Amino acid sequence: MEVLPLAEAIATHVCDGQSIALEGFTHLIPFAAGHEIIRQQRRNLHLIRMTPDLIYDQLIGMGCAERLTFSWGGNPGVGSLHRLRDAVERQWPRPLALSEFTHAQMAVAYQAGASGLPCGLLRHYAGTDPLHAPGASLRTMHCPFTGADLAAVPAITPDVTILHAQQIDADGNVLIRGILGAAREAAMAARRVLVTVEERVEALPAEMNAIVLPSWVITAASIVPGGAYPSYAQGYYPRDNAFYRAWDEIARDREGFLAWMQRHVVGVRDHAGLLRALGVAA
Amino acid sequence: MSSPDYSRDEIMTVTAARQLRNGAVCFVGIGLPSAACNLARMTHAPDLVLIYESGTVGTRPVVLPLSIGDGELAETATCLVSLPEIFAHYLQRGRIDVGFLGAAQIDRFGNLNSTVIGAYAHPSVRLPGAGGAPEISTYAREVLVVMKQSPRSFVSRLDFRTSCGYLAGGGERRASGCPGGGPSAVITDFGVLRPHPESKQLQLTALYPGVSVAAVRAATGWPLQVADTLESVPAPEPAELATLRDLHARTRIAHARPVHINL
């Protein structure tokens, strides 16, 4: 594990054509890392995330992605992800292939990847169309003990998983507090793990069963205060629900979206620049 | 008749809340289901156990979350578990009494579409997709659906079946091996639809005050049947309305609060 500036971590470890998972379920979404990928103009990425959220709307709208693996693609409580929709419905700025699952399916697919298994298992489904959707790859198999029908989902093993977390200690161990989603499984399933954190501390204030990623499973870490904004970091800052609502208008048309991205992401040096441009940080 | 002192949204939310019995374990979707579940918890069902798919178990939010995973849900939860756990240990294992869902389309047998309008490969509208809905509709002992009723949303044929209701009706759901009981009520902005005991076809069982059967039929994309006994839904009580309006007012203030980050 090495601690690197975020731009260097992305430049070193994220390449064109890779499969990458920026995880964190509503909470701890690694926006700063996603924005750096946009600044460095990565292309042909296979983006993996249960809930694409605003960060993948932005990556897709900026032309970074050729495939999306996901299970729920909306702006939670607000409505559509307009850039995702534009890519699927009108192939702008480029066609986007979809691999679509349910949350439960992606959860076991990450678990399988994290466990070194070729597939994850669920009880058999009856009567839902995702089984037959072109992008989905569910297969039915039988329990060798009981003969029960089971649904198998291929393991997800990202080239790179990127997480945001609260703290890293002097030895490089990382603490996550609050809503987890499938962040831990996505990290353990990946070939490389990048982490951004709110702050570096001497020793972690971790309870005995706390969620800690030991330093030796992490490839590189970067200290990025506010790195999850407009998502949130429990104990540091809340989700900016007003921004999530405002995004609906910002992303609705192509020109408005591109102008916003130019001004707030491409045209600033780093995440602190975005936070200042939005008036969120002094 | 004078116009009521409540909106269609309000009576829909209050009616949905009344379906929940105290002590039930409820898997909550975002939006109207979340408002209804929390209203129930704040009125007649203080021991309702609310579970959101973000892994927050037994959460008691003071303001409504905008997303399924706001910090408010984590801070007020009995415990936090990972997403694989919530779907495996709680839902698939059969620990959920009531699942609460919305959708873009519903058919006469309570099957739901939240995936696409049009063909899957070339959709005219790409909807968010499945999320947790297929497993909720499969495993919850009972499913409540809350949806605004119109011919565009209550359709004779779904563009895509994301989540199963009673499939083609009758005993087909049971025969397919779905462990959960299926939708027990669809609460709309006109009244309540429930499945016929035999055919499982949704029929109109209750109307809001001042709503006509003709109006509900006009808002339904199939020939809607009416139950032998058509009930009238009591108007929201003042206490229910006051609690719901306070909840929405607190939520609006909380969601508009500016975020500040110290670099």
Image: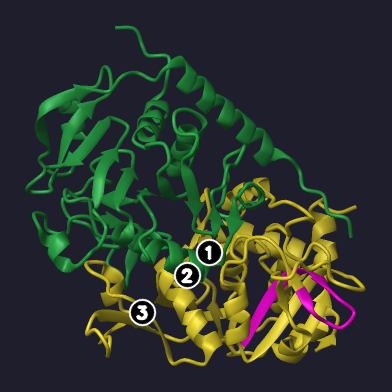
Chain colours: A yellow, B green
Q: What residue is shown at x 57% (from left), y 40% (from top)? A: B64
Chain identity of mark 3: A
The residue at which mark 3 appears reads as A135
Q: Is A57 rendered above or below residue B4?
A: below
Q: Amino acid at mark 3?
A: Gly
Q: Which mark is residue A65?
A: none
Q: Secondary structure at mark 1?
A: helix
Chain identity of mark 1: A
Q: Earlier in the sequence, mark 1 or mark 3?
A: 1
Observer-nearest of A221 and A61: A221
- Taking A117 as reference, is B138 left or right? left
The residue at which mark 2 appears reads as A87
Per the rendered image, the range of residues in magenta is A160-174
Magenta stretch: includes residue A162: yes
In which quadrant will I find the N terminus of chain A?
bottom right
Q: Quadrant of residue A209?
A: bottom right
The residue at which mark 1 appears reads as A83
Q: Secondary structure at mark 2?
A: helix
Q: Is residue A157 visible?
A: no
Q: Nearer the viewer, mark 2 or mark 3?
A: 3
Q: How far is mark 2 from mark 3, CA to CA?
A: 15 Å
Q: Amino acid at mark 1?
A: Arg
Circle 2 residues within 10 Å: few <14, some 14–19, many ≥20: many
The picture places residue B58, in percent across and down from the top left corner, at: 54, 49
Circle 3 residues within 10 Å: few <14, some 14–19, many ≥20: some
**Predominant SS of the magenta segment:** strand
Tell me whether circle 1 and circle 2 mark residues in contact (CB < 8 Å): yes
Q: What residue is shown at x 63% (from left), y 89% (from top)? A: A16
